Amino acid sequence: MVINPTRAAGLNRLHDFLPQAGIAYARRRNEDDVSHVSGLSTWLMHRLLREAEVIAPVRKQHGDAAEKFVSEIFWRTYFKGYLERRPSIWVDYRAEVRQGRDRLATESGLRARWEAACKGETGLDCYDHWAQQLVSTGYLHNHARMWTASIWIFTLGLPWALGADFFLRHLMDGDPASNTLSWRWVGGLHTRGKHYLARAENIRRYTGGRFDPVGLMNEDADPLDGPPVPEVSPVPLGDAWSQGRVGLILHQDDLSPGLPEPEGIATFHIPDRRSPWTTGRHARAFTDGALADARDRFGTNTHLANEDAVAEWAGAFDALAAPYAPQGPAREALDALQVRLGRPIARIMDPWDTRAWHYTTAGYFKVKKAIPRLLDG
């Protein structure tokens, strides 16, 4: 599967996958085979494509048979809203990654196991294949992500936050909320006491027999222990679009915003905030390409490579705005930029998020139940 960082490429992929998005997807999506999944998550993560424009043609062609595909799109929305309404989970994850990095500096045994896991040199064939695939391509099938995370935590005995960091710095569709909360779910921290254990039979079945790690994994591990899930906070309201000359700052989390026409548009290079370690080349290349595509589509040559460049550019405008960035590296960068500039950056919410995040108070079921109302209301 070729994943080019342009909106046009995403639309082409949607068109090509459309015939498979109904019953065929529901039946075969769990197989570790790219031919049975859409591969649209990378374009959705950067909002080169928007959720509604992906769902609409799928529902039109497949009707009720599109239920599973539509539900999978809403999982990303659910995770984003869940984390946004519990921001301390992201803060704590970042702290655990820093603590893990400090441990790696002082615990040679842990560092050796972590390095082997990141290189795909553990001796467990299936895990090593997926780890190497992740690094070499920037992609991993969702089922393989679950298996890999489970093996990392329960068989290799490595800190979950370092595993989530490994994914986030290499995945082209490295969505902070989906990634963090999926790892917490596998470990048993998202739904307390309920974890996901990779099992040899399941791996054999959904890899078509390519791997059969019987007796090589811990299939009896207990879930991780951790603090209670934080209380839910209100859905953020975002800011209003300002009057006067507005400068719009586009960032990696939303590159196709449906906003009023600004006086000026620029893309902002988010510093390498994904991880304390270097971001993977495929993840970096896709983001850089997506920013370039946005400049082409919006007819601007202005790319702001650092905070000083933003400060110089911003002086020409009465107000600044940016698409709302939920918890994650882009949000951190915009917050830091606002402090550096000493002036507000209006964060404009997308109505899709405002409506759907209302239902992210607990598990996914509440969102799933609301899908018809969200799509047709």
Image (spheres, helix red, strand yellow):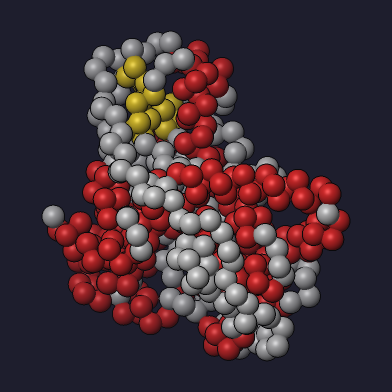
Q: Nearer the viewer, residue 38 or 326?
A: 326
Identity of the residue drawn at 51% across and 34% down: 332
Indicate whether 115 appears above or below 122: above
Q: Is residue 134 left or right of residue 41?
A: right
**Residue 56: % across, % down:** 23, 60
Q: How many marks?
A: 0
Q: Is residue 275 above or below residue 237?
A: below
Q: Can you name the residue that lies furthest to the right here?
A: 108
- Percent across and percent down for residue 178 are 47, 56
Q: Residue at x 36, y 57 (%)?
A: 78
Relative height, residue 12 to residue 323 (above, below): below
Residue appearing at x 68%, y 89% in the figure: 214
Residue 300 seen: no
Which corner quadrant of the image does residue 95 belong to?
top right
Residue 324, quarter of the rendered image: top left
| Residue in front for this viewpoint, 128 or 183 | 183
Image quadrant holding the C terminus, namely bottom left
Give the answer, above or below, for where 51 lies relative to 88: below
Judged from this view, the residue extending furthest toward the front is: 228
The percent coordinates of residue 373 (x first, y second) are 16, 59
Q: Position of residue 141 (x, y in %)?
A: 53, 68
Apparent side of residue 130 relative to residue 318 in the rendered image (left or right): right
Q: Is residue 323 visible to the viewer in this orientation of the structure?
A: yes
User: Which residue is found at the position 32% from the left and 55% from the top?
Assistant: 360
Nearest the camera: 97 or 345? 97
Q: Nearer the viewer, residue 91 or 346?
A: 91
